[in-house]
Image: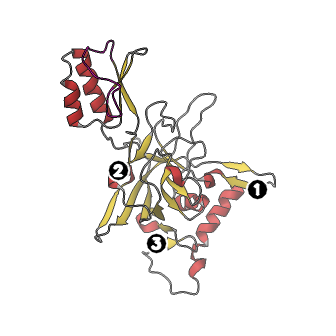
Amino acid sequence: MKIFLACLFCLLSSASVWSQDEPKQPAESPRPLNKSETVLIDKPNNRLLLKTTVCLREGLLEMLLCTKQTKEHESILTIDAPASLIHAGLLGLGAVPGKPVQFRPEFKPPQGQVIDIFVNWTDKEGKEHRVAAQKWVRYATYRYFEAPLANLPSGVPVDVGDDSLRYDSMNKLLLWFGTMSESKRDEFLSHSDNEEYQQAIKSIFDSSQARQMKAKFIFAGSGFTKLDDGELYYQAEAGSVICVANFSDAMIDVNIESTASDAVGRSFEPYSDRIPEVGTEVTVELIPVPAETKE
């Protein structure tokens, strides 16, 4: 592992090789770390820049960013660069990796230095945007929401079409799929004055509204696997560059317990109306946050 990390540092130290025969860039310009210039280090501003592309705007998410041809079906952004190079860039900024999530024998959340992440793009009108990556991710709304209800009041219509309430009589639950609009809430409230029913409708309405992800991103650091030929394989190369669902091979993860199965109600999806169209070029900024010092 030490040899592998040493190789990563070598990548950083040789970053200028790609342009030896070209005019030198100004000292303040970000320095590309690969020939395709999709990963650039900007030490004066303590940030790593990633040249990425929007590949997904709808569906359940496991990643914010994956490597090319890996997990584009569950990641908002994709990048044509090795994950190890991104890891190297963070090390070059002095970032300290922690530990990926552990599931067995008991759950232990991922640990690591906080990384502030911003997404930058230019819209069709030529306006430039820069927002925190969390604004592009929200808790899943394309699912059932539920509230306890001991008895369904008479006269309340259920199971009468896709746009109707459901009632699970065995588990005593009132169910609704997707985001409930204000007009639907008011319509359902008008069906009965029963207090428990009224509370259930209001609870489902509140919980079904779009809510932006608040979790922070942390440098978990992924891990290494020794191949049959003895070489070390950096596990994040499988796609787990910036995750929003906990993975044991994540380079950057969220600092909460999150799962793609929604077992704990923390699955995420793209905040679609905030994300530009598929194919849009996006520059991602990774900025290591210094650890707080205790007095």
Nearer mark to the viewer, of 3 and 1: 1
Give x and y (percent) for residue 9: 62, 63
Can residue 78 be found in the magenta stretch?
no
Q: Is residue 212 visible?
A: yes
User: Dot 3 corresponds to which residue?
Assistant: 30
Q: Earlier in the sequence, mark 2 or mark 1?
A: 2
- 199 relative to 42, above or below: above
Give x and y (percent) for residue 158: 32, 23
Amino acid type, label 3: Pro
Q: Earlier in the sequence, mark 3 or mark 2?
A: 3
Number of residues whose C-alpha sits closer than 10 Å to that of mark 1, classed few (under 14), some (14–19) or many (20 or more): few
**Mark 2–mark 1 distance (CA, rounded to whole Å):** 39 Å
Residue that extends furthest to the right in the rendered view of this protein: 229
**Residue at image point 20% right, 35% down:** 183
Amino acid type, label 2: Lys
Query: Is 225 left, or right, of 79 in this rendering?
Result: right
User: Dot 1 corresponds to which residue?
Assistant: 231
- 216 relative to 144, above or below: below
Compare residues 89 and 277 and report the one nearer the observer. 277
**Mark 3–mark 1 distance (CA, rounded to whole Å):** 31 Å
Query: Is 25 left, or right, of 151 in this rendering?
Result: right
Question: SS class of the residue under badge 2?
Answer: helix
Question: SS class of the residue under badge 1?
Answer: loop
Nearer mark to the viewer, of 2 and 1: 2
**Residue at image point 58% right, 74% down:** 35
Compare residues 26 and 81 and report the one nearer the observer. 81
User: Dot 2 corresponds to which residue?
Assistant: 135
Q: Which residues are magenta?
A: 149-165
Q: Quadrant of residue 47?
A: bottom left
Amino acid type, label 1: Glu
Question: SS class of the residue under badge 3?
Answer: loop
**Residue at image point 67% right, 61% down:** 6
